[in-house]
Structures are given as C-alpha cells and as structure tokens.
Amino acid sequence: MDATPGPGVYVHVPFCATRCDYCAFATWTDKVHLVDAYVAAVLEEIAAAAEQEDLGPAATVYVGGGTPSLLPPSALCTIIEAIERQDGAEVTVECNPESTTNELMAALADCGVGRISLGVQSTSPRVLASLGRSQHPGSLRRAVSAIADAGIGRYNVDLIYGAADEHDADFAASLRDVFALDPAPSHLSAYALTIEAGTPLARDPHRHPDDDAQARRYILADEAAEAAGLSWYEISNWAVPGHESRHNLDCWRQGDYRGFGCAAHSHRGGRRFWNTVSFERYLAAIREGKTAVAGEERLDASRYAEEALELSLRTRWGVPEGAVSPDDRRLLVEEARLLEPRDDRLVLTRKGRILANEVAVRLRVPEPEHLSAPKVPSVTNR
Amino acid sequence: MVDASKIRNFSIISHVDHGKSTLSDRILELTGAVDPREMREQYLDSMDIERERGITIKAQNVRVHWRDHVLHLIDTPGHVDFGYEVSRSLAACEGVVLLVDASQGIEAQTLANCYLALENDLEIVAALNKIDLPAADPERYAAEIERVLGLPANQVLRISAKTGAGVDRLLDEVVARIPAPSADRDAATRALIFDSYYDQYRGVVSAVRVVDGVLRQHSKVRFFQAGSTHEVEEIGVRTPTPVPVAELGPGEVGYLIANVRNVGEARVGETVTDAGRPAGEPLPGYRDPKPMVYCGLYPVDGDEFPDLRDALEKLQLNDASVTYAPETSSALGFGFRCGFLGLLHMEIVRERLEREFGLSLIATAPSVEYVAHLTNGDTELVDNPSALPEAQRIEHIEEPLLSVTIVTPAEYVGTIIDLCQTRRGRQEKMQYLSAERLEMVYVLPLAEVVVDFFDQLKSRTKGYASLDYEPAGLQAAELVRVDLLLNGQPVDAFSAIVHRGRADEYGRKMAAKLRELIPRQLFDVPIQAAVGGRIIARETVKAKRKDVLAKCYGGDITRKRKLLEKQKEGKKRMKSIGRVEVPQEAFVSALRLDE
C-alpha cells in the first residue's frame, strides 16, 4: 500500500425504496423517476472534476447511499467506469440484501467492483420493524451467494445495535447469523443506533437507545468478531487482517477524497467542502455548468493537527504518547483504563472505544518532537 | 416656608394590589401636580423592578396643593421586608389613609401597619377602593374595619382610584381630620431622614421631614448616627419635579442633598440637626438595619468575581441594608456572603445585580444567622452553614424566630395550622375579624419561613391568606448540619443547617436530586448525605459506559469534529469537585428551592 493515503472517490446515490426511522441522510423515496437525470448529473460532475481538478487516479471508490443497488446495473457501471482508477483500486458498492441479485453482482464484478457492503442492520424481523425496516427472510443468504457466485471476493456486513425492541440476545443472534453465512464476511461494521434530529426516531423518546445496553452490545460485537477471526481497526469496524476498508481508513488518516452527488463530502489538503443537500439544487447547478459545492471549511494548522489526533484515536493505531498530558494519562491509562500503551503510542482499550469521546476531549496536540508516525500496515486489495 | 397649620403629612397604608399606586396617580392628577400629558402609570415608582412587580421598594414623597393647603404624600414601601422603612415613613406623618380593596377586605400587612399607626397616635382616614367593581362589598368590609380597628363604619369612604370617584372627598377628609404638624420654629433643628437614594450626579439624595426648627440651604448640618458634618448643598420639595427652596420649616417634607457619598451615611431613621446649634437628643426610633436572610452569591463565570465586587459596592451606595463579605467555596469558587432584609429583598438585589450590572450569578440556599454557643463558653454567629463549628465543640445552638401574623378566610384555618405545625410553629393568637375571616399569630423559626413558606401559604389558601411578620428573638433548638459528599468530598455549597428531626428527609432529598443532576463520569460517584460522621442517605451515579460517535455519514468529518468541540466546551464549564465534574447548571438546579 501507498505511504500517502488516497485519493478516494465517493459517489452518493440518494434513492431508497423506504426510509428507515433513524435515517437523517440525504435520500429520497419519491424521486425514482429522476434516476436518469441524477446519473447524468453525476457523470457530468465527474467529468468536470477530471478536467478542472488535479485529483489523480483513485486508489479507492466507494458508492454509497441511499441504496445504490436501486440504480440499474448499467448505470452503476457507467458511473464507476467514468472514474479514473489506479491499478488494483478498491471499489466498494453498498447494497441492500434484497437488491443484491446475481445479475447486479455479475455486472459489478465486470466493471471492477471487488467489495460489497451489505446493509443488514439486524437479522431479527422484530428488531428491523422497530427500526422502520423490513427484510425478506432468506434474502441475506441469497445475497451472499450472489456475491460469491460473481467472484466478488470481499463483503462487509453493516449491523446496528440499540433499537428499542432489541435485547442482548437478539443482537447476539444477529452476530451469530452473520458469521454463520457462507462465505462469512471478512469485514463487520457495527454501529450504535444514533438519534439524529428530525427523524421519526428522534420524535419518539420511547425508542431512544439506552447507553448501558449499547455498551453491552458493543462488547458482544467485539467478542463475536474476534471469535470469527476479525480484528477491530476502527471503533465501529472489524476486519480479517488485510481486509480493512481502505477507503474508510484513508478518511481516518485525513487522506484526500472527492465526493460526487448531492450531499457528498470532499477533502483536499486540509480543505473540507460539501455539495448541496438539496436534490433539485444539485441537478440545477450541474445542468447550468456550475459547481454543486455549497460549503467549505479550511482548518488552520493546529485545528488540523487536532483533527488528525481525533481521527487517529478511533483507529487501532491510536495517538502518540504526547497527545495526552501526564495527569490525563494517569486517569485514562492507569485509573479508567480507556487507553493502553502499544509501540510508543496510546491505543483505545475495548472499554475506551465505547467511551472514545471522553478520551478525545482530553487530547492535545503534542510538540513536533514528540510526534511519531503511526505504523499503518499495508492493506491488500484483492 | 409654609405655615405649619396649612400642612398635612400622610401615608397611604394598603395591601399589594389594593390600589395605592393608582390612588397616588389620581391625587397627582386631581391636584394638578402632574401635567395630564406627562402622566404615566405608577408615577411615583421609579425603578423598573418596582413597576414590573407592582410594588414600591423605595419611599417616595410628593408635595401637592389642595384647597389652600399643602399636602405631603409619603409613599411607603409595599412589602413586609421593608417594615422598618415603613415605620420611619409613618414617623414622618400625622395621619394615614387606610386603603382597602372593597372586594377583598383588610389584609395582614395592612393590619400590622394600622396597628403601628395607632400606636403612633396617627389619625386614620379609611377608604374602600374599587367600588366600581361588581364584586365590591363595601358594607361588609366597612363593618370589618369598624370591628377590627374601631373606626366607625359610617366614616369609611368609598372611592374608585381608577375612575377618580370620591378621591376629592378623600382629600377633603385628609385636610379636615389629619392634624397639622406641631411646629416650633425656634427649637434646635431636627429633621428625620425616612429614605435615601444614590444619584450618580448628585450623590445621596435624602427624603426628610423637618420636625423642629428650620433646615436652611448652605447651613452646616450634623448627622447624629453617622457622626458626620455636611454642608447643605440643596434642599427642596418634590412637586413631584424637584424644586429647590431656601428653607424647610417645621412640618415640611422635602429632599436634602449634602454631599454624602453613600446611603450608609444617611440611613433611614437618621436625625439631621444644625451643626452650629445641635439638638440635645436625636429623634427616637433609629435602628441599624439588620439582615434577616443570608446567601452566598457567586459569579457563574469565575472571572467575573471582580465585576461582582464592583457591582455590590455600587449597589450598596443605593441600598445600605445589603451587607456583603467575601467568602470562598470549594465548589463555587470566590463569591460573597450577602445579607438581606428578607427573601423579596434578596430576590430584588440579585435581579438588580444581574440586570443592571450584566452578571450571571449562582445563589446558594438562603440561610439565617444562628448563634452557636461553644463548650468553651465562646459564642459564634453563623450565617453560612459550612462555617458551623464541629458538633463536639457546640454546647447548643440558638435560632432566630419570627412572630408571623396571618389573615385568612376561615375555611383555610386547618391547612394553615397544619403548615405552621410542620414548620415547628407555636400558636400565639387566633381571633375572628368577622364571621368569615380571622387573624392568627404564630411564632416560627425564621429558617422555616425562608424556605418556601410564602409559596406554601399562597398555594394552600389559593392566594387568599396574607402575611406579616416581625423578629421575635431567639430560641435554642436541636439543629444539625447536613453535608453532601460527592465521592467522599464534602460540597460546601450544599451544606444546610436543619432541625434534627428533618435531617434525614433533607439528606435523602438532596442526594436524590444530585443523582439526577450529576452527569455520569468515568467511575461510579457515590453521593452521601452526612450528619457529623454518620451517613444518613446514599445514592450512586453509575459510571458512564458509552460516549462515542458511532458513524461518520459519508465522509462528513466536519460534523464529527464540531460535535466534539461542543463537548469540549461543555467540559470547560464544569466545576471539579475532587475528581467529579459538575456542570454549573447542576448547582443552579440543586439550589433552587421550589423543586
């Protein structure tokens, strides 16, 4: 793997068949008739960027949403092929189990997709219902077979824990079901259900997750992943060594990435910018040959260094020892045991991962002489 | 100078909302003192807080002319906290107008002030107000006034301050029935200060009533209590616009400006005499203002401590009854222990500090001043619970008492007796004012009154009961200090002195409240309430187990960083008690009385 991260490309697909109760993301269920116009606009935006921005060939491509698998296979492939990629670039597409068909997987494999991320969330119908989701029984198994049959070597499973109707046993069962799949996933993303303002879930306090329950379930996830041969490498992510998501890793390492599509975020050398969240305004801007960028921030050097620590803390490479004052070290390492020393760096313990904000708010940017670069191992792409 | 025989000096005694300010407004209009175009409501109340709360805090006075007589209307403070100020205002008068709402009847504080007027041999002109209202029942309340105060019912006037009906007749009665001041022009000068306020351009401006002799401009005067000598810079009368005069003769009421820098040197009750020919004795009745209620005031932002000190200094120029002394709290940092005349006074001062000086303050729970008699024979005054000496050094503790007068409709007697008993009260008197209303007098520990007694009384009687009180000495009591400990460390701001029988309840309540208010930390935080070394209540804030941002939506690192920044800001506003981080809001909520 390259010493410098990225660049990555993200493509946002803002369409869903139904909207989940917890989702605050830019996605719509009533705009399917605009799919063609949207795909055209994204292609336009990619072409304009290729002309105007000196991004270079992508090391990773990530098509997320929304539900990318709602697009016609040909449209997905056209988008992916429009992006200039390095040899062996990691290309990931997010899919729902229902729409992970043999036809789609074959098409994706043909255009260079080597990784599928499955939005499973839970295998319990009751828990899915309390998240405002549904899933046909058997669709997960069929999806996994389709991935394997197409020769796509790696897939991730997304799980969410902490729904109101979920018990520890439900989540443990989801983990068991997922790792019993054949082939088993080499990557797990397990996210704590988070209340986002403006969602149906936010308006229903009875369904808000309990911190203690979520802490217990995090431990269940960590234990199940470890038992299945996956190691944590970011707070919410586990992988068979070498199967980490390079796209996400590059994000945590402040790598450059370019986001296309409405509401997509980009990062370029300390400048973070984002496209308009409005579907209509996005289409109009691109149609008129204008930029879809709606906002940006440039961090000064010290804020940028702070951000680097906060992001790196989330990963198994942790932060340099100097990022924690001696007093905080006593508290965080010796007393509360949220951090542990590893190779001259301080890395979150399991307990610390669930309390990472408590550590993050205490970080300080060390003097340059106390900095040591994280030793990030290489990530294979195939 | 005005011929004393043409002068009438009077106050209006009235309950809050019975229409005193409206009557004052009508008198100003009717006598032509204020141009109708410049008239505004509550003309004499000058502070914002006075207008908003509809009460008078400072005594005002105004000179008006009525049918070739000069009337001085002395507007008295309208709250029991300022009882002493009321008594001095009455001392400047020969008579009072008793103003009673014709639909409500006489209330406790009015009754107390009427008793005071009678003791001082003041003439009482009684009037029932608001006779224009449908609920008015003047016959019934005139009879009540006759029964309670012995004033013939047929002499009780009926007026409407709002419409002006009967106000001219009232002024005629004031002239006819209230005696002119006795006047000895040749006696050594004695003038009574019944109010002082600080004007940033002129210094202290005092309201005075000349009792004997003459007060002259540019003369040298001596202040008896302060022991200071000043030159009279200006004297004058309020019409209500201030009009300077060369002399104020016996019986006249006006203002005095004599280059006094703060109101503490021109206190209410002070006697002013001629420095060249001083009177032998001051006028009777002076009393040092003594705080009844204390609390600690701390800036929410520790950096504002110097601002708070400056603000208190400035406020004291204007309100000599506020006392303050610096104190340190391990929980709240640097602040001041402040003394007040009562709870309303405390609230007003705090509100003025926040409003006029732009401060944001934390007030500790109000306390009273206890007298601790130590085993070694010493005596200590304790106005801050955390300063109470250890139990083994204390022989016994005395607490201040109040004599509380309550006037209530008869149907609420039971609930009031119940309230007073749970507050360790002792009944002294109970008498019917009429078939429906009665007067009760209880002796209660002051500490039991400062904690939501008024609110309780109001809610139990639907607002119909009224209250007056005066200090009634000390009594020995079984008192203990309850401390609250966080992670084994006492938090001084939460300590309270309470009766032994109520210590457990207080400890349990506070511990439970704190458990709700203190956010979860990295470790379990035990909360204990203790009396001496004995733990009487215990709660635990369980260690926090989860605090993490799970997912970053589509590479939106910015949002994640902003959430963390917000959390860091919140952390800065925490106060550390040992290892426990307590948000400011927790102190504010925990110290709030009503929960």
Image (spheres, coloured by chain):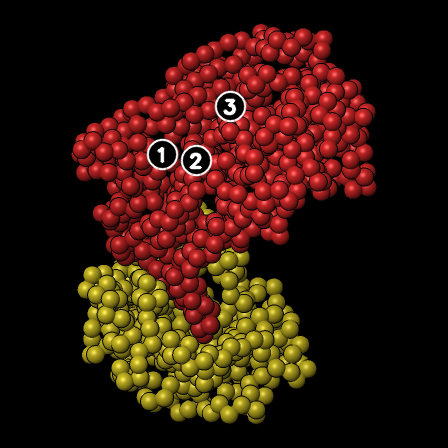
Q: Are marks 1 and 2 in contact (CB under 8 Å)?
A: yes
Q: Give the x, y percent position of residue B230.
A: 56, 44
Q: Give the x, y percent position of residue B438.
A: 53, 12
Residue hosting label 3:
B468
Residue at mark 1 to residue at mark 3: CA–CA distance: 20 Å
State the residue at coordinates (32%, 23%): B475
Quick check: A100 above or below B100?
Answer: below
Residue hosting label 2:
B291
Quick check: B32 above or below A194?
Answer: above
Residue at mark 1 to residue at mark 2: CA–CA distance: 9 Å
* Amino acid residing under circle 2: Pro
- The numbered mark, 1 or 2, whose residue comes first in the sequence reads 2
Mark 3 falls within which chain?
B
Residue at mark 2 to residue at mark 3: CA–CA distance: 17 Å
* Amino acid residing under circle 1: Glu
Mark 2 falls within which chain?
B
Which type of secondary structure does the marked residue at label 3 adopt? strand
> Which quadrant is the C terminus of chain A positioned in?
bottom left
**Residue A156 seen in this snapshot:** yes
In the figure, the shade used to draw chain B is: red
Q: Which chain is yellow?
A: A
In this image, A47 relative to A97: left or right?
A: right
